[in-house]
Image (cartoon, helix red, strand yellow):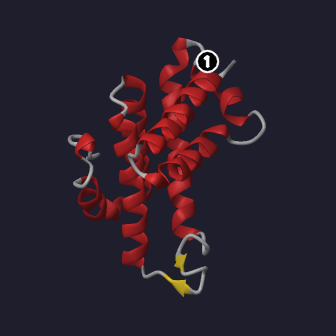
Amino acid sequence: MSVENARYRGGDQFLGFWLRLVVDSRDGATPSGMRRVRSTVDGFRRETLDASPSAEAEAYFAELLDAAERYFDTTLTDPAYATSMFGLKRLSTKQLHDKIAGQTAKVAGMLAGLREDFPGRLAQVWLQGYSNAIPRGHAALARALATFPATAGLMPD
């Protein structure tokens, strides 16, 4: 199966993967939260990476980066994401960036906490996607990452 087929069969599987990780990370690094993240990563790998020829590994991670960037672009423009209190209060730009950075760091921290190569690479791609989509968000991301020791050294340039 080609990387393109792995990504787009039945919708954008890569974008859906990032969204599932954000949802799975809501409980934080609790045992049940980590089990959910592990299950999501393992299932995604089995369904996509293992089906792709190893020669396409870099294309695979490039598609994951593109999907991460799309996710972050959406968070910046989605009115539902940019509100709190059941959509009644619009977040300021700083609040929005802090919210996105916090969720980004939490997902990266949980992926890095799995302490394996594949989830570690996913954490790097996720953070690079944030950095590419929100270039002025480095300070907010650095603050958020500081609360997750497993992410030490993962801050993108």
Q: Count up the numbered dots.
A: 1
Residue 41 visible from this viewpoint:
yes
At 59% from the left edge and 41% from the top edge, which residue is drawn?
Answer: 17
Q: Residue at x 67, y 28 (%)?
A: 6
Q: Which quadrant holds residue 121?
A: top left
Tell me where residue 16 appears, x and y as whole percent: 63, 45
Q: Height in image: 85 above or below 22?
A: below
The extreme right residue here reads 10
In which quadrant will I find the N terminus? top right
Residue type highlighted by circle 1: Ser
Q: Can you give x and y, in whole percent of width and height, for residue 119 in the image?
A: 42, 31
Find residue 136 and report its image quarter.
bottom left
As drawn, 17 above or below 92: above
Q: Nearer the viewer, residue 34 or 101?
A: 34
The residue carrying pointer 1 sits among few (fewer than 14), some (14 to 19) or many (20 or more) residues within 10 Å by Cα, namely: many
Q: Does 22 sit above or below residue 84?
A: above
How far from the left and from the top, in percent, is residue 62? 50, 34
- SS state under label 1: loop
Residue 14 figure quarter: top right
Q: Is residue 14 left or right of residue 144?
A: right
Q: Disc 1 marks which residue?
A: 52
The residue lying at 59 percent from left, 86 percent from top is 88
Residue at 49% over, 40% down: 65
